[in-house]
Image: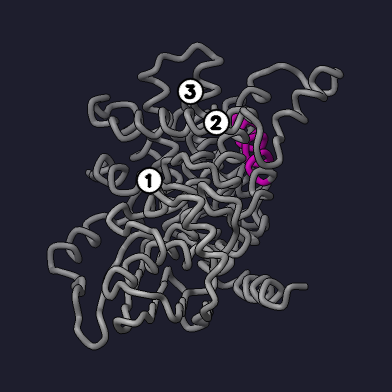
Amino acid sequence: MAEFDFTSLLKNELKPALGVTEVGAIALAAARAYDAVGGKLLHIEMTMNGGMYKNAFSCAIPGTEELGCEMAAALGALGGDWTLGLECLKHITPEHVARAKELEIPIEICVAETKDSIFIEAEVTTENGVGVARIEDFHSNIVYAAKDKEILFRKEKTAESITSAAAFDFDSVTVQDMVQYAKTVPVSELACVKEMIEMNCALSAEGEKGVGLGIWKTLSAFRQKGALGDDMMYAAQKLTCCAMDARLAGLPFPAMSIVGSGSHGILCSMPVVSYGRSSGASEEEILRAVALSGLVTIFSKHYTGRLSALCGCVLGGGSGAAAGITYLMGGGAKEVSAAMDHMAADLTGMICDGGSTGCVLKASSGVYTAFLAAMLAVQDVEIPHNFGVVGSSAEQTEKNLGRISDEGMSPMDATIIDIMQKGK
């Protein structure tokens, strides 16, 4: 079996994020650009790829009641701390919000149609000059900063970083590799996973107080009427949806993101934690299951992309959750592979129409399907190989989803962005 540094992969991909990561990234770029010049704001121009624009369009700004790209850029410039990364709006106050609303300057948001991967360029003009900051590839990856024509910072791809990136060959990774890691990794190496569980559970507790769509309250009301059972699936939907509601409503509490998304992080962790605790699994086994879920999520998103036309929260994080739940049900690599195929057979085609309070509805569907996928898998029920999008293996299925997202659904993505821009 090939050797992969899965521990480092998890550590690199698990990052705290305050609010939806796309508005956080926009604010981060604006904050860095403003920091380069300082002074009275005169003009803000933000250029970004379509997926970034789409995901931030209807997003709540954490700690405020505001939404969207323009407000994220304004708040980033007015009060963001770029040294905090995706938590750059952590110290925003009502005074900052009031000042942002009172700004009488142009704030332009442009979509760079030639950019497929993550890209944001902030150009902030003040009485002192023009500050520029650029983010590429990852939500918090600032690669360039300048004041007027003076370059203040430029990140080069070193030979070491190129070698490191090439060393992790996803095409060679198998489900068996990931399951074996989850079973055998020293639990001391999973501190980041433990932090993920604690952070996302704390976020869920805040959401349970009542924000967003409050899906769990509706589920609870109909449970009392007998339409739903008080079972493990109900408990998992409650824990997951409360965390999603809190994040998407913009509460000032971080989620532990994975592959740049707090929603992915919530969905790949909370259903697994809930099932594990409900079924009496040990905390160590839950840690191992969430680690497996995280790896499957990262593996899936490697092929579909960090900002995809498909709903990555469900097909990435949800596939991870199905894998983690299957593991806790006693399944091995064979059953985990089957659960991943079940997710693809069921929910492929669920679109991503940007980050918004509606994402919690998708998450609820993802929790249900993750449980169903796991239950079928441990009962030796498998979707036959090479049926529809299901490939010759679970690994090939994930690659197929990447093709669907990239080749098949790009026109749909462009249509959604056009709808947003025209306000119809």
Tell me where residue 310 appears, x and y as whole percent: 60, 59
The reply to whether residue 186 is in sight is yes
Give the residues drawn in magenta, as a range: 362-374
Q: Nearer the viewer, mark 2 or mark 3?
A: 2
Q: Nearer the viewer, mark 3 or mark 1?
A: 3
The mark nearer the N terminus, 2 or 1, is: 1
Residue in front for this viewpoint, 356 or 319 = 356
* Mark sitting on residue 211: none
Tell me where residue 214 appears, x and y as whole percent: 70, 35
Q: CA distance from mark 3 to mark 1?
A: 19 Å
**Mark 2 = which residue?**
206
Determine the image quadrant of residue 388: bottom right
Tell me where residue 169 appears, x and y as whole percent: 29, 56
* Mark sitting on residue 174: 1
Tell me where residue 144 appears, x and y as whole percent: 26, 74
Q: Residue at horizontal 41%, vertical 76%? A: 41
At label 1, which amino acid type do we have? Thr
Tell me if residue 25 is in the magenta stretch.
Answer: no
Disc 2 packing (10 Å; few <14; some 14–19; many ≥20): some
At label 3, which amino acid type do we have? Leu
Helix, strand or loop for disc 3:
helix
The reply to whether residue 393 is in sight is no
Side of 91 relative to 411 (left or right): left
Quadrant assignment for the N terminus: top left
Q: CA distance from mark 2 to mark 3?
A: 27 Å
